[in-house]
Image (cartoon, rainbow, N blue to C red):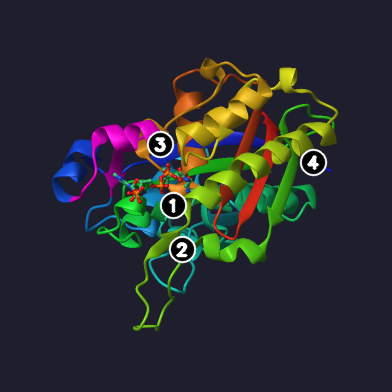
Amino acid sequence: AKRSLLVGFGGFLPERVVTNEELATRLATSDDWIRTRTGITRRHIAGPDDSATSMGAEAARRALDYAGLSADDIDVVLVATSTPDQAFPATAVRIQAALGMTRGFGFDIAAACSGFVFALATADSFIRSGQVRKALVIGSEVYSRIVDWEDRGTCVLFGDGAGAVVLSASESESDARGILSTHLHSDGTTGDLLYVDGAVGQPDKTGHLKMNGRDVFRHAVAKLSSSVDEALEAEGLTYADVDWLVPHQANIRIIEGVAKKLALPADRVVVTVDRHANTSAASIPLALDEAVRDGRIQKGELVLMEALGGGLTWGSVLARL
Ligand code: ACO
């Protein structure tokens, strides 16, 4: 089967930056509490004109530009989001329209913070099966619209933004580059650890994100560790083969836990959580975009992406750039 090569990267962050200090003027919190528990110092927050569609479309334009492709070259648009503008049409279809695409197809994937990993795995399957040649995979989130701004235990953790990658089928089946493996998991028995209270048409519900932070933390370290082992074992690789860890950016302590397991030095781990906070499904493509554009991640290097989120959902993507 053909391999999925990662050929384009793009990101978009809303203009407004909210620091921990600013939050501390409105909530009983402090820069010190947030920084030591999470590594977060600031986050970008969507303005009235920013949405999952507008931010995702801009990240997509930048990724297409990087790849030297146009929207007409794309066969499928997959959008990972838990914060769509509307229940339907899907954000992916709105983004198709924003890009001027009338061919191909698109749909959204809901797997919370693991959404980008799930979307990348789905796009890879389409490419391996020969059904599509080029895919746009986007994570776009506006958690500022679902957090309870009165709940200091959750609202300080999240930020808004979008990231995108373009995948292209390899010319030869023996290409050493591209997505090597994907592993996805979910376990609904842990669904109440992290969820949004309500959906469309439920005015008696708050519509707010609710989280049991301690238990999510515990599951994250254990599940992401086994995820990493599973990904490498499947390819007959060892920790020493990994050049870069590009993790979901929820909390610096979770990221450092996984990096320590891999025995990866800090300068081989892409971290954005300090400046972006947790942007859910957008965090991995935003981190990838940053590290590819500033020259850290080079062609041919082995990149391990991993995420855990509401569901619980978790998984990994192993790719040679
Ligand atoms: N500022 C000041 N104090 C706070 C704040 C705040 N922002 N938030 C909570 N506190 C207080 C609590 O009220 C509590 O006070 P109490 O002891 O008087 O009751 C105290 O701090 C400790 O609260 P805990 O929740 O036990 O703090 P903990 O050390 O567990 O840290 C945290 C909380 C940072 C949320 C941690 O549990 C965590 O990182 N969990 C993982 C959460 C996560 O990453 N979720 C996202 C992953 S999945 C996804 O990305 C959607």
Q: Nearer the viewer, residue 171 or 212?
A: 212
Asked whether, in this view, residue 302 is left or right of residue 275, the answer is right
Mark 1 → mark 2, Cα distance in angstroms: 9 Å
**Mark 1 / mark 2, whichever is N-terminal:** 2
Residue 24: mark in rendering? none
Residue 233 image offset from top left, x and y in percent: 83, 33
Q: Amino acid at mark 4?
A: Lys
Q: Amino acid at mark 2?
A: Thr
Residue sitting at x 73%, y 39%: 226
Q: Nearer the viewer, residue 179 or 145?
A: 145
Q: Nearer the viewer, mark 1 or mark 2?
A: 1
Query: What residue span does the magenta drawing correspond to?
Result: 27-45
**Mark 1 / mark 4, whichever is N-terminal:** 4
Mark 4 → mark 3, Cα distance in angstroms: 40 Å
Residue 300 image offset from top left, x and y in percent: 67, 20
Which secondary structure lies at badge 4?
loop
Asked if residue 37 can be seen in this view, the reply is: yes
Residue marked by disc 4: 2
Few, some or many residues within 10 Å of mark 2 (<14, 14–19, 20+): many
Mark 3 → mark 1, Cα distance in angstroms: 22 Å
Residue 91: mark in rendering? 2
Residue 62 image offset from top left, x and y in percent: 42, 39
Residue sitting at x 52%, y 16%: 267
Residue marked by disc 1: 140
Position of residue 54 relative to residue 244, above or below, is below
Q: Nearer the viewer, mark 2 or mark 4?
A: 2
